[in-house]
Amino acid sequence: MATWLPAASLGILSLVAALALGAAPREAGAAAAIFPPWWDAPRSLAAADRAGAVTGVGAQPFIIITATDPAQPQARALASALRAQGAWLVVDPGLAGPCAPPA
């Protein structure tokens, strides 16, 4: 095994962690959820709708933009609710690509 492999692995993990933190939703009441790519649009929309109000669809049908009333207590739990519904990653809606109204 190469001696540089542990250092490279640590570097890659650090980069992934930094990107995930930098992509986190900036507002408590809005988020874009990235669901598994093999999910079709109706399945992704239904899962996101159970977590919050669907406000748009990202550049791909498995990227769903959701929102809640920021004044409500559940706004802080939006990311957790999306993950509980199957989202792999929850990011700021501005990073979701061009948005379209939900179908």
Image (tube, rainbow, N blue to C red):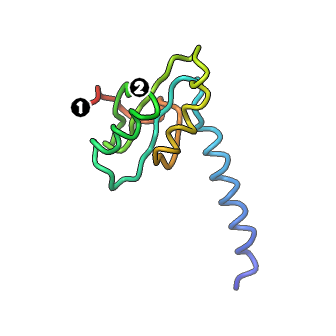
Q: Is residue 38 above or below residue 102?
A: below
* Residue type, label 1: Ala
* Residue type, label 2: Ala
Give the label, 1 or 2, closer to the camera.
Answer: 2
Question: In the image as oriented, which residue stretches furthest toward the bottom?
Answer: 1
Look at the image and tell me in which quarter the C terminus lies. Answer: top left
Q: What residue is pinned by disc 1?
A: 103
Residue 36 screen position, x and y as percent = 40, 52
Total marks drawn?
Answer: 2
Question: Front-most of 48 and 16?
Answer: 48
Residue 55 screen position, x and y as percent = 37, 25
Is the residue marked by circle 2 packed among few (<14), some (14-19), or many (20+) residues within 10 Å?
A: some
Q: Is residue 42 above or below residue 57?
A: below
Question: Front-most of 68 and 20?
Answer: 68
Residue 53: image tag:
2
Is the residue marked by circle 1 packed among few (<14), some (14-19), or many (20+) residues within 10 Å?
A: few
Look at the image and tell me in which quarter the N terminus lies. Answer: bottom right
Q: Is residue 6 above or below residue 22?
A: below
